[in-house]
Amino acid sequence: MTMAGNLRRVTGLGGVGGLRRVARLARRRPRVDLSHPARSPLGSSVVNCVTYQGGVRAPHGGDLVDTVRRVRRNGHGFVWLGLHEPTNDEFAGIAELFDLHPLAVEDAVEAHQRPKVERYGETLFAVFKTVCYVEHEELTATSEVVNTGEIMVFVGQDFVITVRHGRHGSLGPLREELESDTTQLAKGPSAVLHAIADHVVDDYLNVIDAVQMDIDQVETDVFAANGARADPGRIYQLKRELLELKRAVVPLGRPLLDLADRPVRVVDPEIQAYFRDVSDHLLRATEQIAAFDELLNSILQAHLAQVTVAQNEDMRKITAWAAVIAVPTMVCGVYGMNFDDMPELHWRFGYPLVIGVITVACWVLYRGFRRNGWL
């Protein structure tokens, strides 16, 4: 039966207006797997709904309500439901079916949440910030370097609901990778939660490696021969983008440690060891971001120092030329005064002598300034 039939059956079960709207939405629009980049028209909030039993993807049999009932009655397996940017109306029926807490539902729909892990009764609610590197030919003062999105995950004993916001952070390849490892997937919904966390943190490391290349390029430009002419706006832009990355990475540290160290009913004890590994990778990402921030501060200070040195060199050159020009100015100013009794005023060789004195004095000053590096 199609997803439209599933959702219509959900509507019949609960009689909720939100469920009817979800059913109409699924009936109008073809069900496609938005989680895969090649199949993502981004036109439906329903991404996919799959049942797993013993780590193996089960064939569709019956509607969504019957599937959930069967999973709960048998006591094994779980349902993985994926959504993309659902509205309140679209999510209302699903929230009622899986008994999700209203506060968690509000966070999942509204998005723009801080990375966190919260417990609502028997349900675990996790928020992950996804990041991707924005390709650009040349870094400018307005270039976008890091783009962020969000993945919200509801984890229960027999279900996983993922809510994705943003045009990246695809979970399609991750789903396929998990399905190829039946042993890991057989450990239940917590295995999916770990896979998502690991996927998100790996993206952090990939973006950090790409950002490092931009930082290296800026550093090379600043310390080049004409480094004082480099655009400081690029450094500030990198710092702003690095701050965006920092907001996604750093807050996730404490939630991952809690998942790794504190017992949680819906998290398999064997999975906790895997969360420790993810936490270690996140710590590495956090340390690299802190190092990049310090490096950019040093690059900016070095650039400002280069600008100051260049300005000082320009001022020394101006001062030296002013001193050279001051000699003829002074001599011509003295002999330009309208006094009758001035020495050598009517002497035949006075003019050549003055020109010679001016030339020699200017030449001496020029050689002196040139020898001292002022010119």
Image: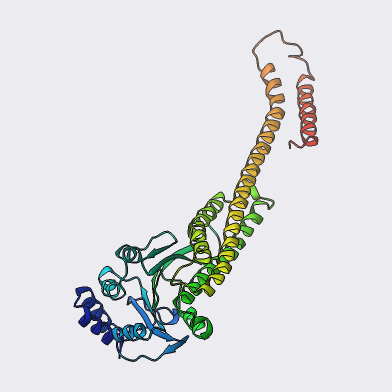
> 39 or 189, which lies in front?
189
Locate residue 173 relative to residue 69 in the image: left or right.
Answer: right
Structure colour scheme: rainbow
Quarter in which the N terminus is drawn: bottom left
Locate residue 54 relative to residue 82 in the image: left or right.
Answer: right
Task: Pinpoint residue 249: horizontal percent, then vertical percent.
Answer: 51, 60
Question: Residue at 44% of width from left, 77% of height from top?
Answer: 189
Q: Is residue 210 visible in this depiction of the protein?
A: no
Q: Identify whether 161 is placed above or below 64.
A: above
Task: Pinpoint residue 38: horizontal percent, then vertical percent.
Answer: 44, 82
Task: Pinpoint residue 43: horizontal percent, then vertical percent.
Answer: 33, 77
Residue 210 in which image quadrant: bottom right
Quarter in which the C terminus is drawn: top right
Task: Pinpoint residue 68: horizontal percent, then vertical percent.
Answer: 33, 83
Question: Residue at 61% of width from left, 50% of height from top?
Answer: 294
Q: How many marks?
A: 0
Q: Is residue 350 visible in this depiction of the protein?
A: yes
> 27 or 39, which lies in front?
27
Q: Identify whether 319 is placed above or below 154.
A: above
Locate residue 11 relative to residue 131 in the image: left or right.
Answer: left
> 345 or 333, which lies in front?
333
Residue sticking out furthest to the top: 341
Question: Residue at 37% of width from left, 86% of height from top?
Answer: 74
> 31 or 37, which lies in front?
31
